[in-house]
Image (cartoon, grey):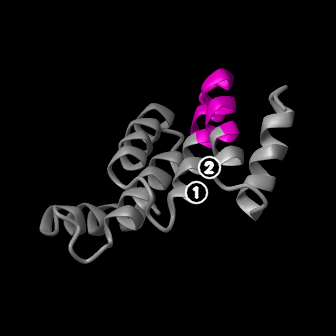
Amino acid sequence: YVFARDCCRKILELDPPDALKLGPTATWVLGLADCTEAKWNDAISVLKAACVKYKGCSIEDKILFSLGSAHMYAKDNAAALAVFNEIIQKFPGTDIAKLAETQASKLGGK
């Protein structure tokens, strides 16, 4: 992910209205690059913004799960639990919801 950072930034720079529909993936990769480098606050900022800007996109569940994980690794368990619970509510019965349930239970949630 780290090596793709410049490319993803360029995609976002060249296509601000997201006409090519690459914005969600490019932004997600930027957040994952920050996660790879344990830059949790940066990852949280990027992924939160992506959740707002690309709400309803085809990878919203993955972006949310990455956001929850970043909160968890940043030791903000309450925020992580809230995100995992959001995934469980929005994407019931999916594999990502099952993963979110596992993470939520580890954090003392449902």
Residue at (52%, 54%) from the top-left corner? 63
Q: Is residue 1 left or right of residue 69?
A: left
Q: Residue at x 45, y 58 (%)?
A: 56
Mark 2 and mark 1 residues within 8 Å of each other at the beta carbon: yes
Say whether residue 100 is left or right of residue 2.
Answer: right
Residue 79 magenta-highlighted: yes
Q: Which residues are magenta?
A: 68-85
78 versus 3 height, above or below: above
Snapshot quadrant of residue 61: bottom right
Q: Which residue is mark 1?
A: 61
Tag 2's secondary structure? helix
Above or below for 57 versus 106: below
In percent of width and height, residue 97 lies at: 74, 54
Residue at 46 percent of width and 37 percent of height:
44
**Which residue in the protein does label 2 denote?**
65
Q: Nearer the viewer, mark 2 or mark 1?
A: 1
